[in-house]
Amino acid sequence: MKIITAITAIAIVGCGAAVAADPPAAPSATPVKHASLKVCNKQADAKKLTGPARAQFVKDCRGGKSS
């Protein structure tokens, strides 16, 4: 019985040390996600844009450029 208790204790301590030794997660290297086409079109509607001005706005919006 003492052997089972000792093995269990070693396993618990070993798992705790392994969890504590993990480095913190690094920030993701993925680029910032820009607005979707749907969001950009809603913003263009709110600004009452049409024609080439609307197309340019949506393009800039999708590219993450502020206007």
Image (cartoon, grey):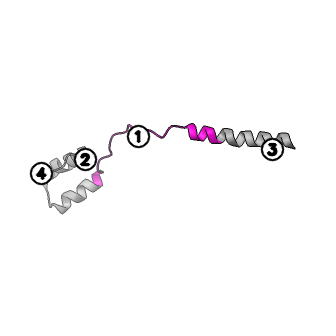
Which mark's residue is nearer the viewer, 2 or 1? 1
Lower position in the chain sequence, tag 2 or tag 1: 1
- Characterize the local packing of mark 3: few (<14), some (14-19) or many (20 or more) Cα atoms within 10 angstroms: few
Q: Secondary structure at mark 1?
A: loop
Which residue position holds label 2? 62
| Viewer-closest of 32 and 56 | 32
| Bounds of the magenta segment | 16-38
Mark 2 to mark 1 CA distance (whole Å): 23 Å
The percent position of residue 6, horizontal first and vertical second, equals 79, 40
The amino acid type of the residue labelled 2 equals Arg
- Examine the image and state in which quarter residue 17 appears: top right
Label 1 belongs to which residue? 27
Identify the amino acid type marked 4: Ala
Among the two numbered marks 1 and 4 on one chain, the one whose residue lies closer to the N terminus: 1
* First in sequence: mark 2 vs mark 4: 4
Quadrant of the rendering where the N terminus is positioned? top right
Q: Which residue is mark 3?
A: 5
Task: State which tag comes first along the sequence, 2 or 3.
Answer: 3
Q: Residue at x 25, y 47 (%)?
A: 62
Residue pointed to by mark 4: 53
What's the distance in space between the residues labelled 1 and 4, CA to CA?
37 Å
Residue 34 against residue 29 in the figure, above or below: below
